[in-house]
Amino acid sequence: MQELHDAPLAPLTTLRIGGPAARLVTATTDADVVSVVRAADDAGEPLLLVGGGSNLVIGDEGFPGTVLRIATEGFALDGTRLTLAAGEVWADAVDRVVVDHGLAGIEFLAGIPGSAGATPVQNVGAYGQEVADTVTEVVAYDRHARETVTLAAADCGFGYRHSRFKADPDRYVVLRVTFALEDASGASTPVRYAEAARALGVAPGERAELGAARETVLKLRAGKGMVLDPEDHDTWSAGSFFTNPILTEAEHAAFLARAAERLGSDVEPPAYPAGEGHVKTSAAWLIDKAGFTKGYGAGRARLSGKHTLALTNRGDATAADLLTLAREVRDGVAAAFGVTLVNEPVMVGVAL
């Protein structure tokens, strides 16, 4: 276990933004993770958990308490049952599952930055697949009960980019995650996402070759600046900064009226089923049609030149720079379409 004081946090995030931690502890075992959490709780000290840092916006003032960087390792495969330690690099784990073991279930989540322990918190998803599809259980330290617990998937409260862990962020510290994968003889799971299906040359609902599915997703993500590259500032982001809005039928009708008034009645905004009485639309579409096109901005924080959903650090941006841009985009979309975008990254010491 390593401990540093007044330690910079920006290098631990994919945005490369944020002030220092009063105390930074790196833990490589579950026992150390639990020990640090317990000590901070006993002392009434603020605690921030950091994995891969891909879903964080840390304020310029930094964090006044203990930052616990979870760097545990562990990749265990029992038949088609995969267990990952929270600190495992998610993208590397997906590659091992697909390339080395030929198992399906998480192939469309290739290239997503961050750690395995963060995936159930956000219910990470992309290209029609999300971890809720395959998670069977999560082992976590319960800070309220002061004990390690095992939560079955049904108890994790999974929803669109949501979970029990996200709803109660100060309670659970994820230690391990177990997934039920599929041996489909070299085939992927059924392709659900239209863009991926087109790129793979299959119809939605059909299976593709497993390796091709992974490679296609990586190419699609790279084309949108969503695969980390230290030389490409379009990837200095927290991924999608806003979630896709889920609207009630009444809200959707009002939105369609606003869109027709602004863009013309022949325009058909994206719409996807989102449960009874709800419709999901595209945040990227809203941002673009509100006038915030790729590369928008003239300062140190700008929209990605590859994807309007990513707010990027062009090299020396501050959290203040980033949030100024985020508010401009959010307020512009609300003014244009009456839809309020919600940030996806976790905000630390700042608020949108």
Image: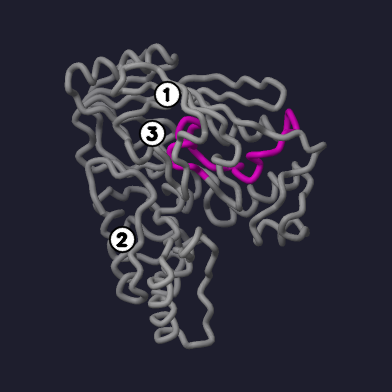
Label 1 – label 3 distance at C-alpha: 23 Å
Q: For the residues marked 2 and 1, what is the alpha-carbon distance in whole angstroms?
A: 36 Å
Is the C-beta separation of discs 2 and 1 under 8 Å? no
Give the class, few, some or many, for how many residues have Cα within 10 Å of label 3's Cα (few <14, many ≥20).
Answer: some
The magenta stretch spans residue 105: yes
Q: What element carries label 1?
A: strand
Q: Is mark 3 on a helix, strand or loop?
A: helix
Residue at image location 56% in from the left, 34% down from the top: 135
Q: Mark 2 is on which residue type? A: Leu
Disc 2, SS: helix
Quarter of the image with the N terminus is top left
Q: Can residue 332 be seen at all in this image of the molecule?
A: yes
Which of the marked residues, 2 or 3, is nearer the chain's N terminus? 3
Position of residue 120 measured from the top left corner of the image (x, y, whole percent): 48, 36
Q: Residues within 10 Å of mark 1 (few under 14, many from 20)?
A: many
Depth check: 216 or 75 in front? 75
Q: Residue at x 77, y 58 (%)?
A: 202
Residue denoted by label 2? 325
Magenta part of the protein: which range? 99-124
Q: Is residue 76 above or below residue 193?
A: above
Q: Name the residue under label 1.
A: 140
Which mark is drawn over residue 12?
3
The figure's colour scheme reads one colour
